[in-house]
Image (cartoon, helix red, strand yellow):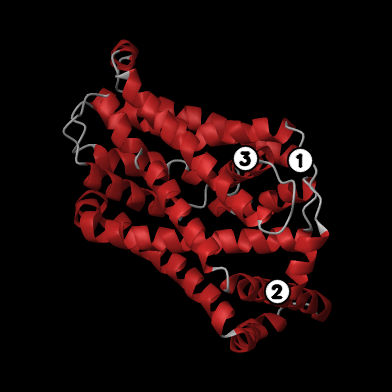
Amino acid sequence: MSRRNKWVLALMFLLGIAIFAFSLRDIKFSVLVNDFVNINFWWFGVAILCMAIYLGLEAWIVKVFISDRIEGFTFKDALRIPMVEQLFNGITPFSSGGQPAQLIALMQTGVDAGKASSVLLMKFVVYQSMIVINFLFALVIGFHSIQDKLHALAWLVVFGFTIHLAVIIGLLMVMFWHAFTKKLVGVIMTPMKWFMKAERFNRMEANINGKIDSFYAESVRISGQWKLMLRVFVITFFQLMFYYLIPYFIMLALGYTTANIVMVTSLHILIVMVISLFPIPGGSGGAEYSFEMIFKSYISSNSKLVLAMILWRLLTYYLGMLAGLVAMVIRPDKVHETPGKRQNSRND
């Protein structure tokens, strides 16, 4: 972990403390403590378990993809990947650092960079697809509620969905219209040539074309393995569901037992979409504001509302980063590629 990343990590924790302090400015500390000691720790434990299962299921997905082609990839190694991803997603704008960090973590286990990139691309496609599908259901159920509470910010949700949908469409175009997509990307990149040095532009163009070719080759290889892909889609569905259910169990822990599980889950899906558009790492500031604005009609007590927000952020953001720090000090096992699987990869 670079010195710069360490500074950003420290800054994000300090920013989080400042945001929590600002949220608590009108709340007596004794009231907050009383609310906390009286929560149902069984339900709060279920919320913690949901986050743990979320990370565990993503590790399972990584293991499914890697074990399909390489021997000796342990679950311990697989579990490092989502933990490292959580850390670098949390300290980079728009979660842009998660993918490169996962790639490095896989390479540390001995996985070839090309295969690691292909696996991460396919995992990304499945994950993005499920986000879009879940969002469509959430939009139907909860958009009217979020529009009433967030007003103009509600349209950020629609904008976020448009971006995610555009990403999926772009990836599908690579899979099914490879040659056309490369030409289209070339046309889109043409104006950039006017403002960049030829050498830099050619290097960037070659890098993008290489990634397109790599993703296309992987999609061709895995297209005949529909059982594998179906398995990953199902695991990803449950992975996201456990994550989206966390606010519901926090509300149960605070005594709001009449909460509608479908509505609360749908609103959380929409909040996650809003957070993804904030340029500050982790959506800090926007995440806390969105949560309080949306759930204040469900949690009548102001102190419990702030406590729910703090518990939610601790579980869904800070816990993941702390887990990533632990993963950084865990020594990975080394894998080896068997001749049989290597030959199968060539045949594919």
Q: Is residue 157 visible?
A: no
Task: Classify 10 Å Cα crowding around label 3: few (below 14), some (14-19), many (20 and above).
Answer: many
Disc nearer the start of the sequence (3/1)? 1
Give the percent coordinates (x, y) of residue 191. 64, 84
In the figure, is residue 15 to the left or right of 339? left
What residue is pinned by disc 1?
2
Label 3: which residue?
79
Which quarter shows the N terminus? top right
Residue, disc 2: 348
x and y, in percent, of residue 162 in the image: 40, 68
Instruction: Name the residue located 66 percent from the left edge and 32 percent from the top edge.
Output: 325
Query: What residue lies at 81% left-to-right and 81% top-to-bottom?
Result: 198
- Residue 223 % position (x, y): 57, 73
Q: Quadrant of residue 99?
A: bottom right
Marks 2, 1: nearer the viewer:
2
Nearer to us in this view, 342 or 196: 342
